[in-house]
Image (tube, grey):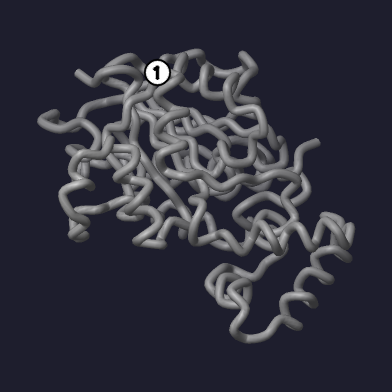
């Protein structure tokens, strides 16, 4: 049983099945933003893999672009079952619905297993997973094997190191208090947050998020998470054969800064790190990578 079997994330209560099919994400291809992923290419059928799909991501990707044939995997059996139900794939009787999306398949599997089609895929989405893995090298090797060379795209989302700094100290306190990932621990975490002074950064951070049990556990009581510097992320990805294609958020955008002649001589990774610190808007770092030089 995984962490997410007990507390699927995002919460199953966040959206109804009908609402899930109307979700859109700019971090995956759809016809009107196709050029973000494959410039100068007309929309065409492609294969997609959603790693650690959680409750809603795979459904949003498959619903927003029928040209994608989407395989969704997650290590949590409970999450997969709930996600399929929320996607409208499974009826009340537990059987596949006749009106289920034909371009979406859910599979209970870990990334390092062989229980899903081996690919390689045209598009791989890995959102909110890497920063929860202590030993990332085997994981990234597997992602490289699953992403088509040159023409494949990997969309990767990790926590950034600046905007979420206060979380490391706060979660350290919760660990010192030995707060468990259960109903009592969730209630105590909420009680502690209510006691914080109004100016505390955790208060404003907490108020900006959904306040449900799944969110509390994922934000504050997860057994492992880490925050990434932009330059560190790019360096690690390059060691596994991935090249930055483009950032999908503005957290590392430096074009609006005037930073002197020395800035222009720096490597791209260093420029992105400087922008990450100066923008201070990196709760999520989201980047698009190619597996080797892109075609």
Q: Position of residue 64 (x, y in %)?
A: 34, 45
* Quadrant of the rendering where the N terminus is positioned: top right
Q: Position of residue 39 (x, y in %)?
A: 15, 33
> Which image quarter: residue 30?
top left
Find residue 144 and report its image quarter. Answer: top left
Write the residue at 46% across / 37% down. 232
26 vs 44, left or right, is: right
Q: Residues within 10 Å of mark 1 (few under 14, many from 20)?
A: some
Screen quadrant of the C terminus: top left
- Determine the residue located farthest toward the left in the rendered image: 40
In the picture shown, does residue 110 fall above or below 174?
Answer: above
- The residue that appears at 49% across and 36% down in the rendered structure is 126
Q: Residue at x 57, y 62 (%)?
A: 14
Residue 145 point in image, percent of width and height: 46, 14
Farthest residue to the bottom: give it.
Answer: 198
Find residue 63 and report its image quarter. Answer: top left
**Label 1 secondary element:** loop
Label 1 sits on residue: 241
> 164 or 191: nearer the eye?
164
- Residue 174: x and y in percent read 80, 61
Residue nearer the viewer, 43 or 260: 260
Query: Can the viewer see residue 88 in this picture?
Result: no
Task: Please indicate, yes or no, whether residue 159 appears anywhere in the rendered image.
Answer: yes
């Amino acid at each position: 049983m995984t962490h997410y079997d007990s507390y699927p994330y995002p919460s199953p209560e966040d959206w109804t099945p009908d609402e899930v099919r109307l979700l859109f994400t700019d971090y995956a291809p759809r016809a009107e933003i196709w050029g973000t992923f494959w410039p100068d290419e007309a929309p065409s059928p492609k294969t997609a893999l959603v790693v650690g799909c959680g409750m809603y991501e795979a459904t949003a990707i498959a619903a927003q672009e029928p040209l994608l044939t989407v395989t969704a995997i997650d290590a949590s059996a409970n999450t997969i079952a709930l996600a399929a139900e929320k996607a409208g794939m499974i009826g009340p009787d537990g059987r596949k619905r006749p009106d289920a999306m034909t371009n979406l398949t859910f599979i209970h599997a870990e990334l390092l297993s062989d229980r899903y089609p081996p690919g390689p895929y045209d598009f791989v989405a890995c959102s909110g997973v890497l920063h929860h893995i202590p030993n990332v090298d085997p994981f990234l090797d597997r992602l490289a094997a699953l992403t088509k060379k040159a023409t494949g795209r990997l969309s990767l989302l990790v926590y950034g190191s600046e905007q979420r700094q206060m979380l490391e100290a706060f979660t350290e306190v919760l660990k010192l208090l030995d707060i468990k990932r259960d109903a009592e621990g969730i209630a105590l975490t909420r009680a502690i947050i209510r006691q914080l002074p109004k100016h505390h950064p955790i208060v404003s951070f907490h108020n900006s998020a959904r306040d449900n049990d799944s969110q509390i556990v994922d934000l504050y009581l997860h057994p492992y998470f880490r925050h990434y510097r932009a330059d560190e992320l790019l360096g690690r990805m390059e060691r596994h054969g991935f090249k930055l294609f483009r950032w999908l958020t503005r957290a590392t955008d430096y074009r609006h800064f005037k930073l002197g002649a020395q800035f222009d001589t720096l490597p791209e990774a260093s420029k992105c790190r400087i922008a990450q610190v100066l923008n201070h808007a990196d709760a999520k770092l989201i980047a698009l990578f190619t597996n080797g030089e892109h075609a």
